[in-house]
Amino acid sequence: MAEIVCAALLAYLIAVFGRIILSWFPLNPEGFGATIAGFLYMVTDPVLGTLRRYIPPLRLGSVALDLSSIVVIFGISILRSAICA
């Protein structure tokens, strides 16, 4: 049972990292990258959207840093170290 939870947490962690990386690049709306990005957004939006309601982006001049992704990565890392150790 722990192996399944560990695998699911790792898959979600990879999805969050993938979403972060794809957000840095412009994507062709009809390309394969847009399909992957759409899937990653669909998978990660429920958790990240909920956190964004409570954790606003950190403004650094004209740039806004989305802290919800960092909180999710940190939380998953803690869960994985507790469950998968």
Image (cartoon, rainbow, N blue to C red):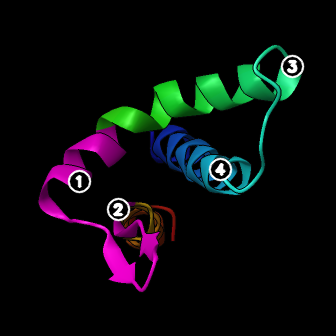
Q: Mark 2 points at which residue?
A: 68
Alpha-carbon span between mark 3 and mark 1: 29 Å
Q: What stretch is highlighted in magenta?
A: 47-68
> Considering depth in this image, is 81 or 66 the residue closer to the camera?
66
First in sequence: mark 3 vs mark 1: 3
Labels 2 and 4: the sequence-earlier one: 4
Q: In the rendered structure, which amino acid carries the disc numbered 3?
A: Gly
In primary-sequence order, the first of circles 1 and 2 is 1
- SS class of the residue under badge 2? helix
Element marked by disc 1: helix
Which residue appears farthest toward the bottom when viewing the image?
Answer: 61
Distance, label 3 to label 4, CA atoms, is 15 Å
Residue position for label 3: 31
Q: Which mark is residue 51?
A: 1
Label 4, secondary structure: give it: loop
Tally the numbered discs: 4
- Dot 4, crowdedness within 10 Å: few (<14), some or many (≥20)? few
Name the mark nearer the viewer: 2 or 4: 4
* Residue 68 screen position, x and y as percent: 35, 62
| Left or right of 72 in this view: 22 | right
In the orientation shown, which residue stands out farthest toward the left?
54
Report helix, strand or loop for mark 3: loop
> In the image, residue 1 lies at what x, y percent?
45, 38
Name the kind of residue labelled 4 in the image.
Ser
> Was residue 84 drawn as part of the magenta stretch in this picture?
no
Q: Position of residue 69 (x, y in %)?
A: 44, 61
Residue identified by numbered label 4? 23
Q: Residues within 10 Å of mark 1 (few under 14, many from 20)?
A: some
Q: Please give the name of the residue rendered at 75% of the width and 20% of the height, measured from the top-left corner.
A: 29
